[in-house]
Image (tube, rainbow, N blue to C red):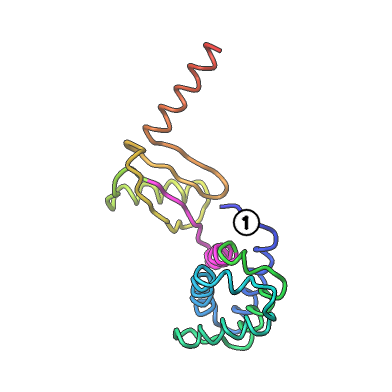
Amino acid sequence: MMYSAIASKYAMALYNVSKANNKTEEYKDRLRVLAQIYDYMSVFLNNQAIKPEKRAQVVCQLMNELGFPADQPFSRFVYLLISNKRLKYIKQILAFFDFTVLEDKGLIPVDLTTAVELNTEEEQLLSEFVKKHTGREPVFNVSVDEDLIAGVVMEFAGKRFDASIKGRLENLARNVLRREG
């Protein structure tokens, strides 16, 4: 996934605060809730006719009612996102925050798309492949796509490895078209 420079700056700032306060997991949960609130209330939260303080207050109050109380640093973060018109980047901020947490633990996120559910042995083989190329333990985000026919597609460290039948067929078709064209 590509991250915007804006999202990465806000995510890193929040991550540094969360780490200093030993609240990284709490803040990660709060960011998830904030992203969900934004999904449901984006019209209200982006309404410039309502003061940023009021919008931030509503969000924090709602988070408290949902069981995810916003402490002073997180409340300030919400206010900054709203007042600087950056709340629209919340999903990218959340993704970069998650990525940073994994990086700090020496792990690497891997998007893995498979044609069918993998068994433990297959997952172990893919894990070894990632370790060999990165030197870090992978954390898989697995999705199943039956259109792949068979095989897997992995994305990590800015690289894409396509070992699917669909990918091979598409590559073969491109090569044939190049030769004929």
Range of residues picked out in magenta: 93-113
Q: Judge left or right: residue 135 versus residue 141.
A: right
User: Percent from the top left, x then y, of residue 105?
Assistant: 52, 67
Residue at image x 45%, y 84%? Answer: 66
Q: Which image quarter holds the C terminus?
A: top right
Q: Is residue 17 above or below residue 6?
A: below
Residue at image x 39%, y 32%? Answer: 166
Give the mark count. 1
The residue furthest right is 84
Residue 104 in view: no
User: Percent from the top left, x then y, of residue 10?
Assistant: 67, 69
Q: Which residue is mark 1?
A: 3
Give residue 152's quadrant in the image. top left
Give residue 8's quadrant in the image. bottom right
User: Percent from the top left, x then y, of residue 116?
Assistant: 29, 45
Determine crowd level at label 1: few under 14, some 14-19, many 20+ residues with C-alpha closer than 10 A.
Answer: few
Q: Is residue 172 magenta?
A: no
The residue furthest left is 119
Q: Judge left or right: residue 17 versus residue 38.
A: right
Q: Nearer the viewer, residue 51 or 178?
A: 51
Q: Secondary structure at mark 1?
A: loop
Q: Amino acid at mark 1?
A: Tyr
Residue at image x 38%, y 36%? Answer: 164
The residue furthest top is 180
User: Percent from the top left, x then y, of residue 74?
Assistant: 61, 82
Q: Judge left or right: residue 77 versus residue 122.
A: right
Give residue 61's quadrant in the image. bottom right
Q: Nearer the viewer, residue 52 or 147?
A: 52
Q: Is residue 5 above or below residue 175?
A: below
Q: Is residue 108 magenta?
A: yes
